[in-house]
Amino acid sequence: MNKSELVSKMASRSNLSAACARRALDAMLESIQEALAEGDRVQLVGFGTFKVTERNSREGRNPKTGEVIQIPASKTPSFSAGAELKNAVNGR
């Protein structure tokens, strides 16, 4: 499912116009991004939790040359599925 298909499904389920559903989806995604950028977690009970995890710096290898390189520390977004989402995916 792509974003347009999701917007259409949201619009039909909520009796909103497609434009309103798109704005609502965009606002939700922007809000999640802003919260993560500020270091907050976003927990949607039953659906899951969005959070930022930190990766330590580490050594890696250039696959072409085999040269050892230093990979810097970084932050990455992650998602942990909630119980209701896991059950829905597993048909329970």
Image (spheres, rainbow, N blue to C red):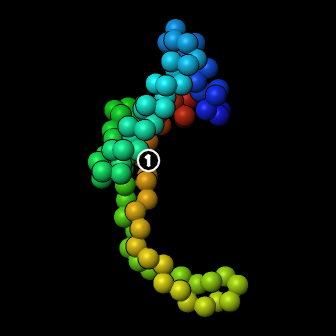
Residue in the picture at 35% in, 51% down:
37
What's the residue type where badge 1 is placed?
A: Phe
Res 2 quadrant in image = top right
Q: In this view, does 20 lie above or below 91?
A: above
The residue at 48%/32% (across/down) is: 26
Residue lying at 44% horizontally and 41% vertically, measured from the top left: 81
Query: Percent from the top left, x then y, of residue 35?
Result: 33, 44
Residue where numbered disc 1 is placed? 79
31 shown above or below 38: above
Would residue 9 be visible to someone looking at this image? no
Quadrant the N terminus occupies: top right
1 or 7, which lies in front? 7
Label 1 crowd (10 A; few <14 / some 14-19 / many >=20): some
Is residue 19 visible to us here?
A: yes
In the image shown, does 8 or 81 lie closer to the viewer?
8
x and y percentages locating residue 75 in the rendered image: 40, 62
Q: Is residue 38 left or right of residue 7?
A: left
Q: What residue occupies the far right of the structure in this picture?
A: 64
